[in-house]
Image: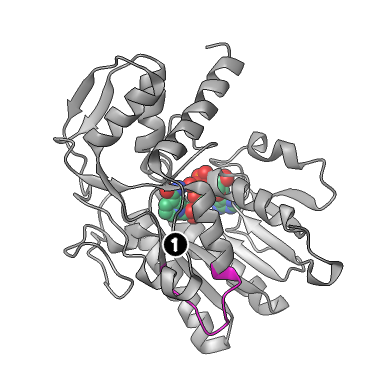
Amino acid sequence: MKRGCNSRKRILVTGGAGFIGSHLCERLLAEGHDILCADNFYTGTRDNVVHLLGNPHFELLRHDITFPLYVEVDEIYNLACPASPVHYQNDPVQTTKTSVHGSINMLGLAKRVGAKILLASTSEVYGDPEVHPQKEDYWGRVNPIGPRACYDEGKRCAETLFFDYHRQMGLRIKVARIFNTYGPRMHPNDGRVVSNFIMQALGGEPITIYGDGQQTRSFCYVDDLVEGLVRLMNSDDSFTGPVNLGNPVEFTMLDLAQSILRHVGSGSELAFHPLPQDDPRQRCPDITLAGQVLGWRPVTGLDDGLARTVDYFRTRLCEQGI
Ligand SMILES: NC(=O)c1ccc[n+]([C@@H]2O[C@H](COP(=O)([O-])OP(=O)(O)OC[C@H]3O[C@@H](n4cnc5c(N)ncnc54)[C@H](O)[C@@H]3O)[C@@H](O)[C@H]2O)c1
């Protein structure tokens, strides 16, 4: 839906060349806004947004948000941060810096120009939870010195900063706690479970299952998640979140592996490996709040989403002649 000139907003998307960010840029452009996508290409690529480069309302800026940015915008979606353990543990100090220094820089920018700002936080702020499913008022159980801490504690500190800028300086903030999201443009080799299983199934390799495969996760299709982020940004100023965005339908890792094998039509075997340190047994959002305040819930079923994601990876492999 196109908007009139008066409602055209200038929107900064940090991490806009990443998986979720590229879908968000597409969506906001389609709504008729001017998009500035800032990314240091740490895990994102120009390829993810190459189809948007010809659009006069889209601008791509190579920028690391651990450094200040001086631009005029109305809204900021702060998504910049590596999201998979493989990537965020590769340079843990930079991961914490991106969440903490990056948030300080983006909040400073929002304060200077009076912009509304949204944080892409994560279900990982709940750590290895004692309660299921997790509501927003659960404070979490995070190991502050473990290998995942750079990400979990980085995001927790980012949330703290958002709320302190809100309380101390009256900034308009929105905090989304995103649960596992999947879809086209996920990284093929980042160790995240959906892309991992699909790549292994397409390659005819064994599917890696950690532990006994009975740990559960819920998976939200990227279009649904983007819808939730946009609704959150457009919600009343009095609503800050944090709000869970995810799909509450739980699957075990074994269920997921079997669905993917079916979609790919692969005969790959299952290979069981030891559970990594601090890997949560269960992860499931309670999305009651998102339903009440944003009127949001995921609408894409796992089968439908997996079919589109498998298509994407199949096409990519064909393009690369594999
Ligand atoms: N995908 C998920 O399941 C999931 C779940 C919870 C939270 N999130 C959050 O959503 C956001 C987007 O995740 P994603 O899955 O699209 O990951 P992604 O790695 O595809 O995207 C992150 C983007 O941020 C960029 N980036 C990283 N550090 C940067 C920096 N210092 N300056 C500028 N750009 C930087 C990367 O190059 C990349 O394009 C992240 O903040 C992540 O923590 C994602």
Instruction: Identify the residue shown where x is 67% and y is 48%.
Output: 26
Q: Pick the residue in front: 67 or 302.
A: 302
Numbered label tally: 1
**Residue 24 image offset from top left, x and y in percent:** 61, 52
Q: Is residue 202 left or right of residue 320?
A: left
Query: Among all residues in the image, which is located at the extreme left?
Result: 212
Query: Which three-letter amino acid code belongs to the residue tagged 1?
Result: Ser
Q: Is residue 5 left or right of residue 127?
A: right
Instruction: Identify the residue shown where x is 26% and y is 27%.
Output: 208
Q: Quadrant of residue 3?
A: bottom right
Packing grade of label 1 (10 A; few <14, some 14-19, many >=20) is many
- Vertical position of residue 124 compared to residue 319: above or below: below
Instruction: Identify the residue shown where x is 51% and y is 65%.
Output: 119
The reply to whether residue 89 is visible in this rendering is yes
> Magenta stretch: dominant SS?
loop
Instruction: Identify the residue shown where x is 74% and y is 68%.
Output: 73
Q: Is residue 306 magenta?
A: no
**Residue 52 image offset from top left, x and y in percent:** 74, 42
SS under mark 1: strand
Q: Pick the residue in front: 61 or 256.
A: 256
**Residue 269 image offset from top left, x and y in percent:** 24, 17
Query: Among all residues in the image, which is located at the extreme top?
Result: 321
**Residue 94 image offset from top left, x and y in percent:** 47, 51
| Residue, disc 1 | 121
Mark 1 and ligand 1: say if the CB distance to the nearest ligand atom is below 8 Å: yes
Per the rendered image, the range of residues in magenta is 232-243
Classify the position of the N terminus by image quarter: bottom right
Q: Is residue 234 magenta?
A: yes
Q: Pick the residue in front: 246 or 320.
A: 246
- Vertical position of residue 249 compared to residue 172: above or below: above
The reply to whether residue 79 is visible in this rendering is no
